[in-house]
Each structure stands twice: as structure tokens, then as C-alpha cells.
Amino acid sequence: MIYLDNAATTRPDRNSVQRALRFLENDFFNPSALYKEGFDIHREFESARKSLLSHIADSASFEFLFTSCGSESDNQVLFSCARRGNFVTTEGEHAAIYNAAAELKKRGIDVRFARLNADGSVNEEDLLSQIDGNTSLVSVIHVNNETGAINDIAKLASLAKMKNPDLVFHSDGVQAFGKIPFRLTKEIDFYTVSAHKIGGIRGIAGLARGKRRNLYPLIYGGGQEGGLRGGTENVFAAKQFEYAAERKFSALEKDFEKVKKFNESFRTGLDGAVFRILSADTASPYILSIAAPGLRGETLQHMIDDHGVVVGTGSACSSRNRFSRVILACGADEKTADGVLRISFSAENTGSEIAEAIRIINLCARTLADKMK
């Protein structure tokens, strides 16, 4: 199998899993317990928190909250901070933001969506025009999970706060963390990350929080995470997340260049008579959105899968919808949106895998096109 759906989830890093296993098998104690073993595990848990934050932010200005997934992190910010006035976000957000925004609208919050550019990045002018003195929260995805478009969140946060210094700025960074270089600036108040996009296991994620910003719990319990998330801490998952992130960030530049070559191979190797490249050259190299207008993306995906290559058809969290709302928001017509495939790479892929995947995808697309003549 050639796996090219790494924006959906990644293979857990074997070395990181092995290193963390002792927190399942031997050091299994509750980190909230008052005996020595509990204290020792608590220190390990806090070490993971400190390490994960260090990759993207200064501990003097930010702290790190563990959650179960990126969707939980996103929801906690939205339902904590969009309680009054208006909430401004974009048409290119992950379903965790988009659907939470729909719920906020039902609760009486004025929700405003900024338009997208053709590549899936937010239209800066339209975003800023939506912000006013009553804006309580702005949320802009860092790397679009369907097109790979990179939003300059540091710039956008700064401009947003020039219009309203009191608003809260959040970004979903799930597709950026461990993949593109960045550091959080003081204008960014909350930032979502997730383990399973970088070789971590599912069920653990995080939220970087500016220390001056208020947050309310979604889960009440024993006061864990500073009272912001009840529930016994998952030390094994936190440590495996820590170790996977260490490996990703230590090889960030090398992996970026490797994956960039894979991306370029696809751009030049795909049959131009069948496919359109939707992702801009400036997008994250980890994600490549392509379309075969006139062909059904889901049908093509199954044909490719039958040949041993796994690709996506858009966001894995909403892939059962025929047309991607994000691709449509980029200005594509339904014929194009219906034929979308999302190719997403890992540094674990090889050059020979990429060459074979291109061959199979071209073969399947031509075969399907011939059948539809």
C-alpha cells in the first residue's frame, strides 16, 4: 500500500510509541495521586507539556493545555470566547470551526464568514472588513486542510487587533504544527495542535493559550488542566505526542524539502489533459489538491485504492459530502468540485512510491474518462 492521505491521519511513529510504552506497562500511576509514584508521573506529564509548547511559543507568554483532539480544542475556544457581539471566521475552516460556528449562530451570536481567495487562503480585505468594535473572536485556519493554502496568521492577528484591540484571535494549526516553521506572536491568543497529524496517536491534542486569556471548561471533573479540562490525564498519549513532536521538529527543514520534491513530482507528472492543480505553488507542500473535472472524485478514489494507493477526496472529517464547501468557496464550479482528490504526503514516503502513485492515478483517471465517453 502507498499511503498518501497523511492530512487525514499519519502512521504512529514506532520509535515514539516504543519510548512511551513504559507509561502503559510500568509507570501507569495516576499523576494526581499523592504518593511518590504519582508525583513522578506528574513530573513526566508536565515535562511533555513544556516540551510541546517549546516548539512554537515562549513559556513566559503562553501555556499548553492537553485535550483529546483538535476539534475539542477548537470548540473550547469558540464556546469560551464567542459569547457576545460577533464572531468572525472564514469559509475555509475545518468542520470543527465551521459547524461550531453554526451552533453559535443558533444561540444568537452574529457569525460572519470571510471569503476565500482562489487558492483557499482567506481574503485579507474581506476578513478585516468583517471586524468591528463588537467582534469578540476571530478564528483563521493556519494551513487549509484541503488546499494547503498558508494564511499569515501573525500578520492577520496584528491587523485584526489594530481594528479591535480587545478581540481574541485563534488559529487552528493542526496542518501546520510540525510541518512548517513558525512561532506564535503575542497577538495570537489561542492555537490548536494535534498529535495524529505528525506521527502521534489519536486521542491527544493540545491548545496553546496566551496566559492573559480566559478559557472555560467543556468537561468538569477533578480539576485537571488547571480546572479547564476534567478527567484523569493520559500520560502515555502525552509522552508519545512529546516524542513524536521532538522527532518531527528536529527534522522539520529536511522533511519540508523532501516532501516539496514529492509535491513537485506530482505537479509535473500528472496528466494535464485530465487533471487541474488547485493548490497554489505557495501552499504547504504536504497537501496537494487536484481535480479531474467531469469525473467523480469518489469513484476515482476507489479505483486508485483498488490499485494499492490511498488518497483523499477532501477533508477526512466531511468526505461524505459530495461537493467540498471549501473548494466551492474557492470559486470552483460543481463539475470541478465533484472531481477533487487530495494528495497529502509524509516524509516516510519514498521517491519510488511517488512515481508509482502518479502512474496509477493517471492510469485510473484515463480509464474512467474513457468509460465516460
Image: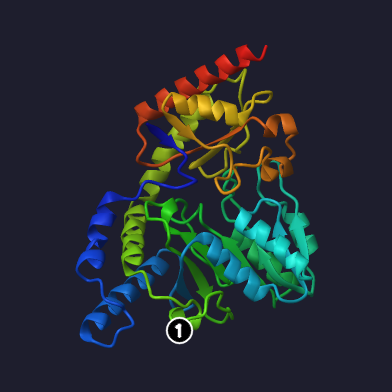
Task: Locate the N terminus by quadrant.
Answer: top left
Tell whether 155 sits left or right of 191.
Answer: right
Tell whether 93 sits left or right of 346.
Answer: right
Give, as a three-letter code, the residue at label 1. Answer: Gly
Residue 196, picture quadrant: bottom left
- Viewer-closest of 366 and 264: 366
Residue at x 69%, y 38% (from the top left corner): 323
Residue at x 37%, y 51% (from the top left corner): 199
Tell whether 100 sits left or right of 71.
Answer: right
- Viewer-closest of 25 and 81: 25
Task: Locate the C terminus by quadrant.
Answer: top right
Q: Is residue 95 above or below residue 286?
A: below
Residue at x 22%, y 71% (from the top left corner): 27
Residue at x 33%, y 69% (from the top left corner): 235
Residue 35 position in % (x across, y down): 24, 87
Q: Name the residue that disc number 1 marks.
A: 223
Label 1 Cα neighbours within 10 Å, binned few <14 / some 14-19 / many ≥20: some
